[in-house]
Image (spheres, helix red, strand yellow):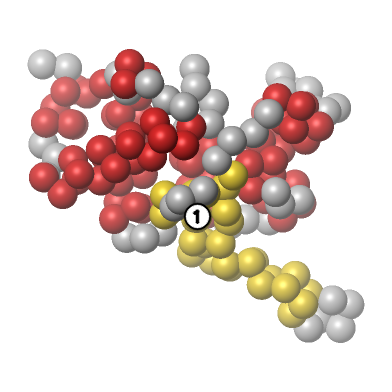
Amino acid sequence: MKEVDAKTETLSKSDNEVIESIKDWLIANRGYKEYDFSEDFVSEKLLPLLKLVKHDEIIFGDNKITQKLRIPLEAKNSKGDTEKRITELNYKVRYQDWELQNYTKGINVSKDPMAYVAAQIAMLTDQPKGIIGKLYDVDSNNTKLISALYFLG
């Protein structure tokens, strides 16, 4: 038995229901096909989302994915007063290649892969790259889990 099989076979009924609801969302909103959900895909891209979805940190909604930040960001003015508080990121359902090209223009992915990933997430969330770069580690890691659903391969 492969390790991947072991991971998916030990899921509870409610865990399987969550995985199926994510699959259904991806089919309905992202244009996925059943054959996209290989055992490796489920193990590597969906299982890491399971606990976050179950605890409402990631919500697959009608026309977006919402990520609730564990550590909100605060934009302060020159006096140190909070002008804006970011408590969640909303991911668009779809994007077109030109949008990604605009956000990643000038970034050499082989020299600065993290800047490229931040630009991808900025594009998906319609947030400035500078905001994405200020996310704390746990929230940043969760953005990468979500963004993996947009970039098959």
Q: Secondary structure at mark 1?
A: strand
Expressed as whole percent of the image width and height from the top left, the position of residue 26 reads 41, 34
Q: Indicate the quadrant containing the N terminus: top left, top right, bottom left or bottom right.
A: top left
Expressed as whole percent of the image width and height from the top left, the position of residue 75 reads 75, 70
Q: Residue at x 11, y 36 (%)?
A: 10
Q: Nearer the viewer, residue 103 or 62?
A: 62
Q: Residue at x 29, y 29 (%)?
A: 43
Hey, which quadrant is residue 12 in on the image? top left
Whether residue 112 appears in this view of the structure is no
Instruction: Give the vertical position of 124 relative to 55 (above or below).
Output: above
Looking at the rendered structure, the number of numbered marks drawn on it comes to 1
Q: Residue at x 52, y 62 (%)?
A: 69
**Is 59 on the left-hand or right-hand side of 47?**
right
Instruction: Give the vertical position of 53 relative to 113 (above or below).
Output: below
> Callout 1: few (<14), some (14-19), or many (20+) C-alpha neighbours within 10 Å?
some
Expressed as whole percent of the image width and height from the top left, the position of residue 27 reads 39, 31
| Amino acid type, mark 1 | Thr
Q: In this view, which residue lies farthest toward the right?
A: 78
Q: Nearer the viewer, residue 54 or 30?
A: 30
**Is 22 on the left-hand or right-hand side of 74?**
left
Q: Residue at x 38, y 39 (%)?
A: 25
Expressed as whole percent of the image width and height from the top left, the position of residue 3 reads 19, 22
**Is 17 on the left-hand or right-hand side of 35?**
left
Whether residue 105 appears in this view of the structure is yes
Q: Which residue is mark 1?
A: 66
